[in-house]
């Protein structure tokens, strides 16, 4: 088995970057017919060939048995073309479709209709196909099968709104979570690689509603209606990072696994300073904040442990003020930010800020309206942006500020409020 030779089809560059990566978790939001399935078929075969031993299982999980059979048939045809004499490959027909390789590895193809049937086995690598159409419990089950083996997983699918586990996991990967890879394959990536015909994509663009085209061909999820800012309004506010001098700052402090985020706005309301970090001790965090805000009026999250940080910072910069988050105060803060975004009086660069704005949501509870990121995701950038926006709107931004050269803004401060 150590001398087993194989030749797998080549992937185009975006496919290779998405799937043939070192990260354990790779989440790919992809256009229809962009090569996501073919890329993962080749990845799973490579894993089974290189890591396979007698009895080791490698899973392909899809929303239903019928969808799983599509990958089964395609991989079977691929292997038959590679070895038409069937001397290397042995196909096994069982109640669950399997392909046994010459090294003893077993490719298993499963539907996830009943997630309870996915528990129990030790799996050495897995693909979850059409993830947005799989139940979240199926993801939990497949993840549990990789625990003993520390197996890798590839999660792929078209986007389908925002209120699903795959979308939220993609945002976690996109935020820079350790050992996670995020990628997006669009129809135009496939066109560039020669996989799709441009005329076909342009025809779909003309014939389909805009939201449908963006989801199916650009892998851009539609708005599910639970976002207080509005997806179109968020995208309208995307601007390059401003090179102007800051007017004020907002700072959100890390809680446990969260991020500390510092955002500065210029006089036009555009983000001109953006910094984000994890896992620094408090003295390091405080020093970094002071070096960034540099005497400009700042509104800082003083909730919980933030109170002591605020005390330390105010000894150096008295114009750093605190904001305590509660359900009521956060609602007010986010409503102000939503108003600024809808009016396009605030701008921000694409990337982490936009990602968090797009997943941010609200829901009605008995206690009132709850504003937050979905469970397991972050809203630190949103909070820092909202704090900066609040500080910018307060007239005392201009009162009692020291160590600042205002000549950049001219003599009439009212022009910039």
Image (cartoon, grey):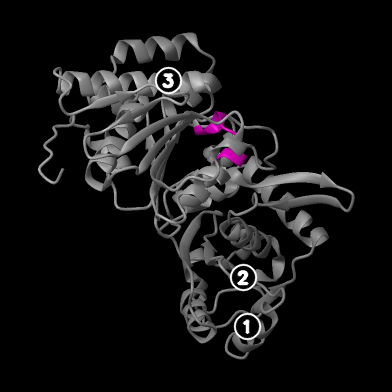
Question: Which quarter shows the C terminus?
Answer: bottom right
Residue 259 locus on image (x, y percent): 53, 66
Q: Name which residue lies at 43% across and 12% down.
A: 204
Is residue 366 or residue 247 the one in the foreground? 366
The CA distance from mark 1 to mark 2 is 13 Å
Q: Give me the C-alpha separation between circle 3 and circle 2.
A: 45 Å
Neighbourhood count class around disc 3 (C-alpha, 10 Å): few under 14, some 14–19, many 20 upward: some
Q: State if disc 2 and disc 1 touch (CB < 8 Å).
A: no
N-term mark: 1 or 2 = 2
Q: Earlier in the sequence, mark 1 or mark 3?
A: 3
Where is 238 relative to 133, above or below?
Answer: below
Residue 377 on image: x %, y %:
58, 53
Image point (60%, 47%), residue name: 345
Q: Residues within 10 Å of mark 2 (few under 14, many from 20)?
A: some
Q: Secondary structure at mark 3?
A: helix
Quadrant of the snapshot with the N terminus: top left
The reply to whether residue 263 is in sight is yes
Question: Residue 57 or 260: which is nearer the viewer?
Answer: 57
Q: Which residue is mark 3?
A: 69
Magenta span covers which residues?
Answer: 131-138
Q: Report crowding for label 1: few under 14, some 14 to 19, many 20 or more residues within 10 A (C-alpha).
A: many
**Sooner in the amino-acid sequence: mark 3 or mark 2:** 3
Q: Which residue is mark 2?
A: 255
> SS for tag 2?
loop
The residue that appears at 40% across and 55% down in the rendered structure is 150
Secondary structure that dominates the magenta span: helix
Which numbered marker is on residue 309?
1
Tell me where residue 42 appears, x and y as whole percent.
27, 33
From the viewer's perspective, tell me whether residue 107 is left or right of residue 408. Answer: left
Q: Is residue 365 above or below residue 130?
A: below
Residue contact between numbered discs 3 and 2, judged by CB atoms under 8 Å:
no
């Amino acid at each position: 088995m150590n001398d087993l030779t194989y030749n797998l089809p080549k992937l185009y560059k975006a496919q290779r970057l998405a799937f043939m990566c070192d990260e354990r978790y790779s989440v790919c939001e992809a256009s229809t017919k962009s090569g996501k399935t073919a890329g993962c078929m080749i990845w799973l075969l490579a894993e089974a060939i290189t890591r396979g031993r007698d009895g080791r299982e490698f899973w392909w999980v899809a929303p239903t048995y019928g969808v799983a059979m599509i990958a089964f048939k395609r991989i079977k045809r691929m292997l038959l073309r590679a070895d038409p004499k069937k001397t290397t490959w042995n196909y096994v027909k069982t109640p669950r479709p399997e392909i046994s390789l010459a090294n003893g590895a077993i490719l298993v193809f499963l539907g996830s209709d009943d997630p309870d049937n996915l528990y129990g086995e030790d799996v050495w690598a897995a693909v979850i196909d059409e993830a947005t159409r799989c139940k979240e419990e199926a993801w939990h089950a497949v993840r549990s099968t990789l625990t003993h083996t520390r197996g890798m997983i590839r999660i792929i699918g078209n986007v389908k709104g925002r209120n699903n586990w795959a979308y939220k996991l993609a945002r976690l990967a996109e935020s820079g979570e350790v050992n996670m890879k995020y990628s997006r394959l669009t129809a135009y990536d496939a066109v560039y690689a020669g996989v799709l015909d441009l005329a076909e994509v342009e025809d779909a663009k003309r014939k389909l509603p805009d939201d449908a085209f963006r989801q199916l061909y650009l892998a851009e999820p539609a708005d599910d209606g639970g976002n207080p800012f509005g997806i179109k309004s968020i995208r309208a506010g995307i601007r390059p990072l401003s090179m102007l001098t800051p007017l004020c700052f907002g700072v959100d402090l890390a809680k446990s696994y969260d991020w500390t985020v510092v955002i500065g706005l210029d006089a036009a309301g555009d983000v001109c300073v953006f910094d984000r970090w994890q896992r620094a001790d408090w003295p390091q965090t405080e020093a970094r904040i002071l070096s960034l805000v540099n005497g400009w009026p700042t509104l800082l999250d003083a909730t919980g442990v933030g109170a002591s940080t605020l005390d330390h910072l105010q000894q150096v910069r008295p114009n750093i003020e605190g904001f305590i988050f509660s359900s009521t105060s956060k609602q007010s803060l986010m409503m102000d930010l939503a108003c600024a975004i809808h009016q396009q009086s605030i701008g921000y660069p694409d990337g982490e800020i936009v990602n968090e704005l797009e997943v941010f949501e609200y829901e009605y509870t008995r206690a009132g309206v709850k504003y937050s990121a979905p469970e397991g995701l972050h809203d630190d950038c949103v909070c820092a942006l909202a704090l900066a926006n609040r500080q910018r709107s307060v007239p005392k931004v201009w009162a009692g500020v020291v160590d600042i050269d205002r000549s950049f803004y001219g003599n009439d401060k009212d022009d910039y409020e």
